[in-house]
Amino acid sequence: MTKTKAAIFISGRGSNMMALVEAAKVPDFPADFVVVVSNDPAAKGLEWAQSQGIEALAVDHKAYGKDREAHERAIDAALRERGVEFICLAGYMRILTPWLVEQWQGRMINIHPALLPDFKGLHTHERALEAEVKEHGATVHWVTPGVDEGEIIAQARVPVFADDSAEKLAARVLIEEHRLYPAAVRKVLANYSSGNKSAS
Ligand code: GRF
């Protein structure tokens, strides 16, 4: 089978990246993760990627000052040099510029730790507890210019218990994220051909 060359963007520990890379070890997984990109050279996940023989590329946003687009142009150029066709955002903690989103729309997905459209943005677990929801979870969605607003690809649900802390709830959601993200990549890339923007 032809695998789609893909990149994973991280900013920290990279547990979702690990789940994707592990899932991609089976022969029929439709993506080949050729590079892991981080805006933070100290991101823990970079070392792990390297230990797996995957290129770990740090493009430090601090080197670009306030010019967010210049930072993303550097990343974009690196991706194109490597023939990357698809991007999985996995705990990438930068809001993307409209420019980068435009370059990759239809070829870039994200995982968000909440049941979108509820709890867009940060601190989702704390906010879910404050709102006293009975169910919480994670969403994989297409990336569009509005933050956490793109079309939903797949969701995973977990119960919220009366004695939950944000940490306990986050841990329960994270277990589901690690199953959800590889499954969502499989779903999206089935019948996907390079440059096909109607893959959803
Ligand atoms: C995950 O909860 C993900 O949904 C969110 O940020 C967290 C990243 O965790 N976008 P990790 O770096 O994948 O471990």
Image (cartoon, helix red, strand yellow):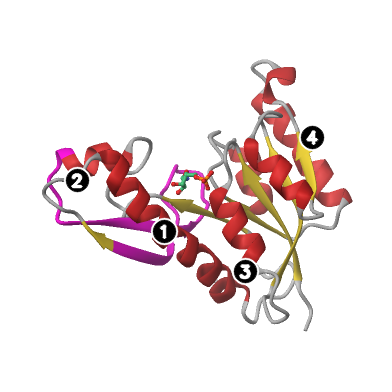
Place of residue 78 in the rendered image (x, y in percent of width and height, measured from the top left): 83, 43
User: Disc 4 marks which amino acid?
Assistant: Ala
* Front one among 114 and 105: 114
Judge depth for marks 2 and 4 and give the one in front: 2
Q: CA distance from mark 3 to mark 4?
A: 28 Å
Answer yes or no: is residue 105 visible. no
Q: Quadrant of the N terminus?
A: bottom right
Give the CA distance from mark 4 to mark 1: 33 Å
Mark 2 and ligand 1: say if the CB distance to the nearest ligand atom is below 8 Å.
no
Relative to residue 160, is residue 108 drawn left or right? right
Q: Tell me if 152 is positioned left or right of 88 in this view.
A: left
The residue that disc 3 covers is 23
Residue drawn at 37 percent across, 35 percent down:
122
- Asked whether the beta carbons under mark 3 and mark 2 sit within 8 Å of each other, the answer is no
The disc label shown at residue 175, or none? 1
Rendered position, 93 above or below 181: above
Q: Secondary structure at mark 4?
A: helix
